[in-house]
Amino acid sequence: MNNSLEVFIEEFEFLASFHCGDLSVDEMQISLKYSEIFPHKITGSLTGTVKKYNELVPLLNNQIQDEKLSFKSVNLKNQYKIFSSDSVSMPSFIYPLGYPKNVSFEIGKLELRNLTISQEFNNNAERQIRFYLVGPQRIWNFICRYEVKDEKIEPKDFIKIDINEDLPFDLELNVIKFDKSDEYEKKLTHSYEVMSLTFILKKTHNHIADNELLELCTSYVNDILLLVSFIGRKRIEWFCYKFYSKKEIITFIRENRRTDDSEPDLHNAFLGYHNTLPFIDKSLPNYRNLKNNDFDLTAVIRYYLSSLEMPYLEAKFSTLFTSLEYIKTLYAKKYKMQKIVSDNMFKKKISKLIKDDLKEIKNNHPKFQDDEMIKKLPELNRMSFSSIIEKLCISYGFRLKSLYPLNEQVTLLSTRNKLIHEASIPIDVLLKEYYRLRLMTEILILKILNWDDLSNLYESHEMQLVTDSVEERKCT
């Protein structure tokens, strides 16, 4: 069987109305190319006469001024799908020099950041939203069995994902199989499988409006995928959803996001694949509760994942350190550690005293640049990075020294300063410091999420590498 993905790319032509700000142009001929089952660029082209081109030019000029170009297809009786997008760009277009007035030509190419497809649907079952995923699949620890249905091999199993919350929906992890058959011989020629998360509304919550349900499910799927990406050290995202409401199916496709589909090594998932679903069950409510109480780990984990994707060690370390800085900032904000004393006290007493001393020095040394020092004064009222990190580690029961051999000093902050300001660190030293920083970030995130089992991290190859000592690797 040929498994080329090109056959799963959809192409449609239709008439659409384009909008940009207060301007609009009706009945533009558009063709689109996209896929609903795997990440693919959403592209298209615009065709029209010289007259249509002249109508379109003001919109394109408006678009250059950061206005969104959008469109919606004309609802014709014979058209069973309605296409729309609120983020369209036309990076280049052709000036119609020499074209006859009534001859159509390709005005330009289109690039879409998203695409919504609506079609009528009489749904007698419960409303549900299915998100198609891209990224490694093994982390879910789901082995799907198959059965024969209508002479076709179809996925048989799904996993119900439990979350320690009272939610208005059930959540299932599924494998969805797509087939293509030869148009003439009616013979199966292509097959493709997609991992998906499906939210099924409970009957007891039928009062929830479609837009509220969609917003809630999108929020949950984003959080779940971020947490699973974190423990798998590989980014997993959704690229398309299908919303089966009572009256229509709404398909939403967003622009192709760069995600590595390759499966991670078994040891890369530092909690072990068997812990993925228990981790979601326990950590997701904690993660969302933290987010609702101004301790949002989203940026922390995103920078962590970005650091893993960087090609060079220096970039990995610097990006990962940003993740740690976000943790420090969240902690300092929560426990009001941003300032040593109040701004009012610092301004009226401490700052005034220092300024008076600087003026006195200036009087005795005319070339002394007191204005440059005065600019730096507000920084004196900030608690140091190392002090906050020390308090943070104590608060979550983590010993930073457990990442170093016995009697060796903690050097993470000095390594960061050297890398940023001097850029001269031996690669073997930086590699060890990077692993320490990664272990520290992972352990802190897990502790903040109240996940107790850290044995895989403390017994990992990375921990052996950075400590050079078995005794130092015991859990704290």
Image (tube, rainbow, N blue to C red):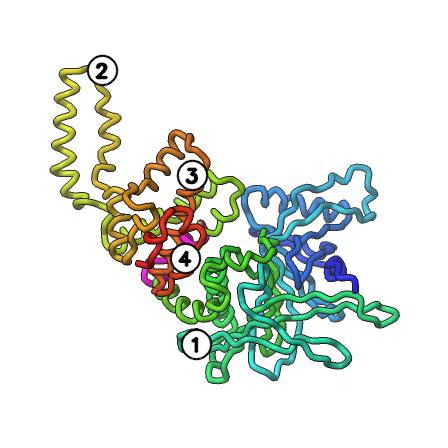
Highlighted magenta segment, given as a residue range: 291-303
Point 77% across, 65% down: residue: 190
**Quick one: label 4 or label 2, which is nearer the N terminus?**
2
Quadrant of the frame with the N terminus: bottom right
**Residues under labels 2 and 1: Cα distance?**
68 Å
| Residue named by callout 3 | 430
Q: Position of residue 12 (x, y in %)?
A: 74, 60
- Mark 1 surroundings: few (<14), some (14-19) or many (≥20) residues within 10 A: few
Q: Position of residue 228 (x, y in %)?
A: 48, 62
Tag 2's secondary structure?
A: loop
Identify which amino acid the numbered label 3 is placed on. Answer: Leu
**Residues under labels 2 and 3: Cα distance?**
41 Å
User: Is residue 319 or residue 372 the one in the foreground?
Assistant: 319
- Mark 3 surroundings: few (<14), some (14-19) or many (≥20) residues within 10 A: some
**Quick one: label 4 or label 3, which is nearer the N terminus?**
3
| Residue named by callout 4 | 459
**Quick one: label 3 or label 1, which is nearer the N terminus?**
1
**Residues under labels 3 and 1: Cα distance?**
45 Å
Q: Does the magenta portion include 294?
A: yes
**Quick one: label 2 or label 3, which is nearer the N terminus?**
2
Q: Is residue 31 left or right of residue 122?
A: right
**Marks 4 and 1: CB-CB under 8 Å?**
no
- Mark 2 surroundings: few (<14), some (14-19) or many (≥20) residues within 10 A: few
| Residue named by callout 1 | 167
Identify which amino acid the numbered label 4 is placed on. Answer: Glu
| Residue named by callout 2 | 367
Q: Is residue 286 visible?
A: yes
Quadrant of the frame with the C terminus: bottom left
**Marks 4 and 3: CB-CB under 8 Å?**
no
Point 64% across, 76% down: residue: 145
Number of the front mark, 2 or 3? 3
